[in-house]
Image: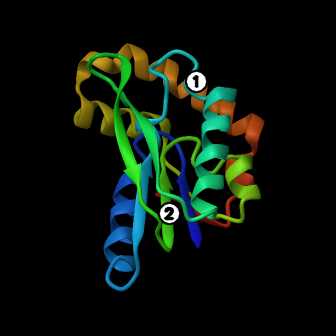
Amino acid sequence: MTVIAIDGPAGAGKTTLAEKFLNIYSVNQSVAVIHMDDLYNGWNNPLSKDLTLRMGSILKRFSLGETFDIEVYNWTTMSFDGVQRIQPSNILIIEGVGAGQQIVRDSGATTYWLDIEPEIGLQRVLARDGQEIEVFMHQWQVDQEIHFLRDKTRENAQHIQSS
């Protein structure tokens, strides 16, 4: 079983790369995809130890070949109110800020890092998700930078792509 983790700042193109990998690998293998946006606990302290614990549980259950459910965060209701069922598969793709953190690297994942200038990333996110989240996104950029520096995510990625 293979884990692919795609990390980098908001707006860098992680979801797009995950979709490309899904299209390539799903031709002859089973593939599951987890979007980190579904795992965060909203805007406040999203890159917390709780997220790391959830990642550890996901990785363990995937490695055991189990079917399992993950709670999905609803950004409209600002609560966990959905479920995604993860079936056993050959490949698990995890994409989003925090996907390539230490616990994921320690699991043997292949890690990708996508670079982007902060202002370009911000504009991409606002174009995609709406101007009303701009104030939240400024704080998000600070939070993700603190996480990346603490975790040394980019420095430990196996593959780095600059835009």
Of the image marks 1 and 2, the number of the one nearer the N terminus: 2
**Where residue 30 appears, x then y in whole percent?**
40, 74
**Image label count:** 2
Label 2 sits on a secondary structure element that is strand
Dot 1 corresponds to which residue?
A: 142
Q: Residues within 10 Å of mark 2 (few under 14, many from 20)?
A: many
**Where residue 130 appears, x then y in whole percent?**
23, 26
The residues tagged by marks 1 and 2 sit, at their Cα atoms, a distance apart of 28 Å
- Front-lying residue, 115 or 71: 71
- Front-lying residue, 41 or 157: 41
Q: Quadrant of the N terminus?
A: bottom right
Which amino acid type is shown beneath numbered disc 2? Leu
Q: Is residue 124 above or below residue 43?
A: below
Q: Is residue 142 left or right of residue 75?
A: right
Q: What residue do we see at 37% from left, 53% from top?
A: 15
Q: Which mark is residue 92?
A: 2
Which amino acid type is shown beneath numbered disc 1? Val
Label 1 sits on a secondary structure element that is helix
Question: Quarter-wise, where is residue 112 in the image?
Answer: bottom right
Q: What residue do we see at 59% from left, 42% from top?
A: 98
Q: What residue do we see at 69% from left, 28% from top?
A: 49
Q: Is residue 74 above or below residue 31?
A: above
**Where residue 120 appears, x then y in whole percent?**
39, 40
Q: Is residue 112 above or below residue 79?
A: below
